[in-house]
Amino acid sequence: MGAKLMSVEQPLWRALTGYRILAVLYVLGVFFWSYREYSAPVPGGVYLLVLACWTFGTLRNVGSADRCTLPFLVTDIVLGVVGILLSPVVDGHGLVGPTLPSIWVAGPVLAFALKGGWRWAAGASVLVGIANIVERGMITRSTFHNVLLVCVASVAIGYVIEVARASERTLARALQIEAATRERERLARDIHDSVLQVLAMVQRRGTALGGEAAELGRMAGEQEVALRALVSSGVVPEPGRAPTGDRWPALATDGGNPATAPDATAPDATDDDTAPCDVRALLSSYATSRVTFSEPGAPVLLPARAATELAAAVGAALDNVARHAGGGPGGEAHAWILLEDEPDAVLVTVRDDGPGIPAGRLADAEAEGRMGVALSIRGRLRDLGGTAELVSVPGQGTEVEMRVPKHDN
């Protein structure tokens, strides 16, 4: 999928780390500010020294859910409860007011919420609430208010964490499905550009030759239908990386032998995908006696991968002309390729003077598993962040306009 997803709960763990540091500094400040008012300050000082060492020594444990283990959480909450129960001994006259751990004790409760969700948060907050009530000896208004506040806050945070984690899992599954779908479409394009077209050619040639060749053509036709059904249903086999691109030059020059077709994927396979490539060099191989190629005088540069995919889409468009508009051997259709270099995009227009496409034919072809326009042309352009617009008027030919933005490549 490329970029790694950042957990939405990670900022909350960083906030908890900051809270624990500030809370322990606040508790130490209150203790030393009110030192003379404690009836037994020495035990309180020892406890707060342990609390400070524990807080700063375990900052790594509150850095993520994986590091915040259950033994750490139990020790953390026990340390807070011990401080609450020790407060009446240290502040025997009740002159200071807050318990020894004071606001620090909310940190362990929040850690339970971030680690285990709202149920763990509710359990931890109830434990702290009971300790506060025991320390006071009764349920006072201020005690009830503080306990309720901590409970509501921790439960709410725990619930939000559970929802966030569920959303992350859903998003991860959606991204995996999207990646798998894109890979299936890429494989389907390769199948369409190679295997399906060869099978269709074998069927046509076999039927024309008759005899044993006719039987071979019939079998090739059956395999083509079965493979198209697999492609259209999304169950695509794992073929080897077949050459993508053009059948037009082969059909126009040597009677349809795909082995002699010019290579539309001119960039070497070892070239980096981002290396600049002149689109003119790729498209010029399509020029034949019935394919006119018009290009700018200056190089038209795109990253190698984008240029290759654009050339393959042009090859698919020409193949449709060869198969459906009479551009194959013996046909009379003519095609024109126009390459334009715009400031923010590269534009390629493929036009023919064939009979055009009847209304609704593209939708019917896609339903039958014939994915040439849907995958080999529009799919490729979509993956590049571009668009492919098809305009066809019956009796006046077809025009395909392909646009690839430069800033997305």
Image (tube, rainbow, N blue to C red):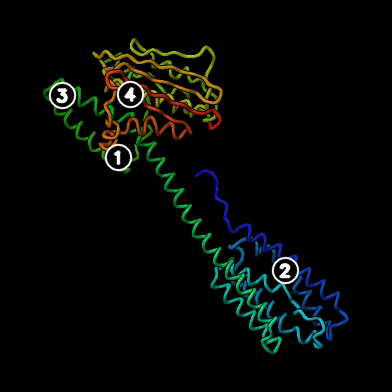
Mark toward the start of the polypeptide (4 vs 2): 2
| Residues under numbered marks 2 and 3 in contact, where contact means CB atoms less than 8 Å apart | no
User: Circle 3 sits on which residue?
Assistant: 207
Whole-percent x, y for residue 229 in the image: 26, 39
> Which labelled disc corresponds to residue 232?
1
Q: Residues within 10 Å of mark 1 (few under 14, many from 20)?
A: some
Spatial CA span between label 3 and label 1: 26 Å
Left or right: 405 as drawn, with respect to 336: right
- As measured in the structure, the alpha-carbon distance from the residue carrying label 1 to the one carrying label 2 is 60 Å
Using the image as rendered, state which of residue 253 and residue 178 is in the foreground: 178
Tell me which numbered mark, 3 or 1, is placed earlier along the sequence: 3
Mark 4 or mark 3, earlier in chain = 3
- Is label 4 or label 3 in front? 4
Q: Hey, what amino acid is under mark 4? A: Ser
Q: Residue furthest right?
A: 36
**Residue 227 seen by the camera:** no
Which residue position holds label 2?
55
As displayed, is residue 395 above or below residue 79? above
Asked which secondary structure carries label 1, the reply is helix
Q: Amino acid at mark 3?
A: Thr
**Mark 4 or 2, closer to the camera:** 4
Mark-to-mark CA distance, 1 and 4: 24 Å
Residue 46 in picture, x, y percent from top left: 80, 78
> Residue tagged by mark 4?
392
Q: Secondary structure at mark 3?
A: helix
39 over 274 or under it: above or below: below
**Mark 4 vs mark 3, CA separation in Å:** 30 Å
Q: On the image, which quarter does residue 118 sit in? A: bottom right
Q: Residue furthest left?
A: 211
Task: Say which of marks 1 and 2 sits in front.
Answer: 1
